Image (cartoon, rainbow, N blue to C red):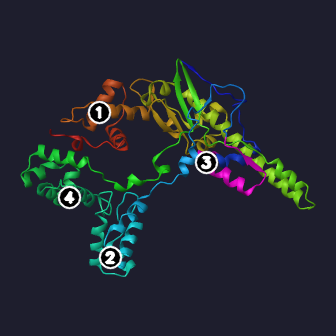
Amino acid sequence: MEVGLFQQQSLKLSMSKELSQAISLLQYSSLDIASFIQEQAMQNPLIDFGDAPLVTSRPSVYKQNANDDKDLLNSIASKQETLTEHLLGQIVFLELTTKEHDIICYMIENLDEHGYLKEDLMLVAQACSCNLEEVEMVLNSLQQLDPIGVGARNLQECLLIQLEQSGQLSDELEIILTEYFQEFAYKKWSKISKECSISLEQVQKYHDQIKRLNPRPGLLYATQAERFIIPDYIIKKEGDELVAYVNEELDFRLSVNDAYRQSLMLQDNHAVKPYLQEKYREFQWILKGLQTRKQTLNAIVHGLLEKQQRFFQHGPSFLQPLTMKELADYINVHESTVSRATTHKYIQTPFGTFSMKSFFTASLKLGTTEETSVMTVKELIKQLVEKEDKKKPLSDQQLTNQLLTEHDVKISRRTVAKYREQLNIASSNQRKVYV
């Protein structure tokens, strides 16, 4: 398969004075760059920018994102209701005294991102100059609001609130969640079955029921910036060619505001010329910094296309061992430049969107002399768990044995356990199902 190359003047970047000045821009995400440019334009009257993205006049396989009609800045700036706003909009329908209104507003303002009230109720009472009984009564009112489960003080209470309000809380399930919550969560179900005279199959059904609840109700009102990742580059397969598209929706065409400069030049003021010279130097620094940033990122993505070609062709399990130093040497920049430039940057691929840093991974020795990446081994573990018999899940030792016999990957059981935990895969005991 061929790889579509960039339109580029040179990949040989050096630590020039301009690059040294612009290095701070490398770590900025696309949104940070947009904010930076707008801020600079407000401070520098010579800077003018249009809405059109920067594009070269010559054709290139390294293309602009096809979704040109989407105004990303407008969508990000658009107003989205927060959890606080959603709750404050509901309390107007509650019959509350002035003091109770102040208490519930205080609670709402102190909910965490999950919708939980982590502050001790006694501290709430002190802050609101009231007694504990009043706080508990107002908390009960808060917990009746939408989304169901908001105002809970922990996961256990959040689940109980949702079950009770939806009419799903049986006496049996309430006992399990209040008296055996840890055993239930960590699948130590034999004790529950024995002491509560409940079959393991019934406990499994309760577990499946709980899994359908929302453990973090507040996340429904997370901000758009928190919920969505904006890719800087889009990699696609077109025929036998890998094509890299530039997502330039946040890139602006910068130019000098000649009309403003000419009007200042006509003024009879000796301080104007030095002022214009300083602002023009600032403009040149910004322009050069952005150009260097783009050139560096293009070089990095070009290098990733070459070094991780199998990943882009076949998926994450084919990620090759690659360090930042190896890529830095390949494109002739310093390793720290690659580290800075890949911070807060994302690449959209046919297999999902990945951070640029995820394409760098250490190597592991196979049973032979070959090497494989840590991500590849994690993907193999994930696949083995997905295919296992859920009634007889694979232990870490069994996973270790299958990695060796089926994939020629020789690693320790402890390493398998570490990778499994990093993948948020539960232990074999916790993965076991009974029905």
- Disc nearest the viewer among 1 and 2: 2
Residue 387 inside the magenta-drawn segment: no
Which mark is in front, 4 or 1? 4
Q: Is residue 34 magenta?
A: yes
Residue under circle 2?
A: 122
Q: Which residue is drawn at 36% across and 71% down?
A: 104
Q: Nearer the viewer, residue 190 or 275?
A: 275
Give the mark count.
4
Q: Do the residues labelled 3 and 4 touch (CB within 8 Å)?
A: no
Q: Residue 386 carries which label?
A: 1
37 left or right of 124? right
Region in magenta: 26-51
Kind of residue indicated by mark 1: Glu
How far apart, in angstroms, are the residues tagged by discs 4 and 2? Answer: 26 Å
For residue 426, above or below residue 365? below
**For the residue labelled by badge 1, is the local secondary structure a helix, a strand or a loop?**
helix
Query: Gap in Å between the C-alphas at discs 4 and 1?
Result: 33 Å
For the point 16% across and 60% down, which residue is it? 179
Residue shown at the point (25%, 37%) measured from the top left: 395
According to the picture, the residue beneath numbered tag 3 turns out to be 28
Q: Which of marks 4 and 2 is nearer the N terminus?
A: 2
Q: What element carries label 4?
A: helix
The CA span between labels 2 and 3 is 43 Å
Name the residue tied to disc 4. Answer: 164
Residue 410: give x, y in percent of width and height: 36, 30
Neighbor class of circle 2 (other Cα within 10 Å; few <14, some 14-19, many 20+) is some
Instruction: Tell me the CA gap for discs 1 and 3.
Output: 37 Å
